[in-house]
């Protein structure tokens, strides 16, 4: 009984000390000698003083901050490079004076600029029935392989079924993942723009596709203008 009472008192006392220190964070100012006397366990170094432990924590946080900064800089450089490539492609697309020229420019430049395995524009057969020398997609094909396509309003990114990949990339080989953009303007379905990779994990649902969405928006406007 006595041992339990003593244990309860120690717990209560420790809790009171903790509460006091939290309420008085400047307690150790002017009492730095106490920090040097306080010992904490450390897996690698055994028992170390509170001061040493604090220095180690600051050093670890500094290393972590440098890693995050380096990662931030690397991401910024990648985005800058992606912006330049996107800008170049969009300027070329805006120079197109025909639907054939628009599609040809996209196919010629997109996959090379973005280092991917396939880039494809398919025009909706119903909307561009008189246009020749371009790849098209019909309502029957959509209904058989990808009935969701004409109803989609946002981009889709990730892995698709084999029949969907064959529809979206008629000239691509073994496409395993893709990002797909329905091309729309004023509520009209004009076709579909897709980027594909032979790697199953290259495109996923968490991928940032802002730049590619911008390209799709420009293509949609140009399709409506040149139709």
Image (cartoon, rainbow, N blue to C red):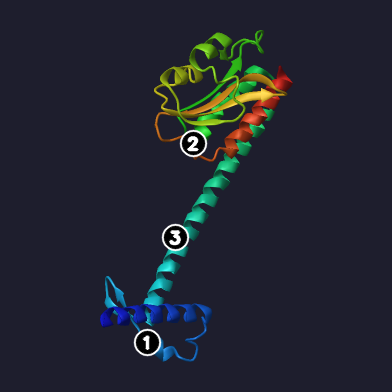
Q: Nearer the viewer, mark 2 or mark 3?
A: 2
Q: Nearer the viewer, residue 43 or 139?
A: 43
**Residue that sits furthest to the front in the current view:** 1
Q: Disc 3 designates what residue?
A: 67
Chain-order first, disc 3 or disc 1: 1
Give above or below for 58 relative to 213.
below
User: Does 56 appear above or below 140?
Assistant: below
Q: Residues within 10 Å of mark 3 (few under 14, many from 20)?
A: few
Quarter of the picture holding the C terminus: top right
Q: Which numbered disc flags the more N-terminal residue, 1 or 2?
A: 1
Q: CA distance from mark 3 to mark 1?
A: 30 Å
Task: Kindly state the secondary structure of the residue where label 1 is placed.
Answer: helix
Badge 2 element: loop
- Quarter of the image for residue 10 reads bottom left
Q: Nearer the viewer, residue 92 or 38?
A: 38
Spatial distance from mark 1 to mark 2, Cα to Cα?
51 Å
Q: Tag 3, which secondary structure?
A: helix
Q: Position of residue 176 (x, y in %)?
A: 41, 27
Spatial distance from mark 2 to mark 3, Cα to Cα?
26 Å
Residue drawn at the location 70% of the way across and 22% of the way down: 187
The one of 208 and 105 positioned closer to us in this rendering: 208
Q: Which residue is mark 2?
A: 205
* Quadrant housing residue 147: top right
Q: Position of residue 115 (x, y in %)?
A: 47, 34
Q: Residue at x 41, y 20 (%)?
A: 162
Circles 3, 1 touching at the beta carbon (< 8 Å): no
Is residue 67 in view from this perspective? yes
Work out whether residue 96 can be spotted: no
Q: Are marks 2 and 3 in contact (CB under 8 Å)?
A: no
Mark 1 lies on residue: 36
């Amino acid at each position: 009984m006595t041992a339990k009472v003593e244990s309860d008192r120690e717990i209560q006392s420790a809790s009171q000390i903790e509460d006091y220190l939290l309420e008085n964070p400047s307690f150790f100012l002017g009492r730095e000698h106490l920090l040097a006397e306080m010992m904490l366990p450390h897996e690698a170094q055994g028992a170390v003083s509170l001061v040493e432990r604090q220095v180690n924590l600051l050093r670890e946080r500094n290393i972590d901050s440098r890693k995050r900064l380096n990662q931030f800089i690397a991401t910024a450089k990648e985005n800058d490079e992606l912006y330049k490539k996107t800008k170049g492609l969009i300027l070329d697309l805006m120079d197109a004076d025909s639907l054939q020229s628009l599609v040809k420019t996209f196919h010629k430049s997109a996959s090379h600029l973005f280092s991917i395995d396939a880039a494809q524009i398919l025009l909706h057969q119903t909307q561009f029935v008189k246009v020749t020398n371009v790849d098209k997609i019909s309502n029957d094909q959509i209904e058989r392989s990808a009935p969701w396509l004409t109803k989609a309003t946002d981009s889709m990114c990730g892995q698709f079924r084999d029949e969907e990949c064959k529809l979206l990339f008629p000239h691509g080989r073994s496409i395993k993942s893709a990002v797909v953009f329905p091309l729309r303007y004023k509520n009209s379905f004009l076709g579909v723009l897709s980027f594909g990779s032979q790697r199953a994990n290259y495109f996923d649902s968490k991928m940032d596709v802002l730049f590619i969405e911008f390209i799709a928006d420009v293509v949609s406007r140009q399709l409506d203008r040149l139709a």
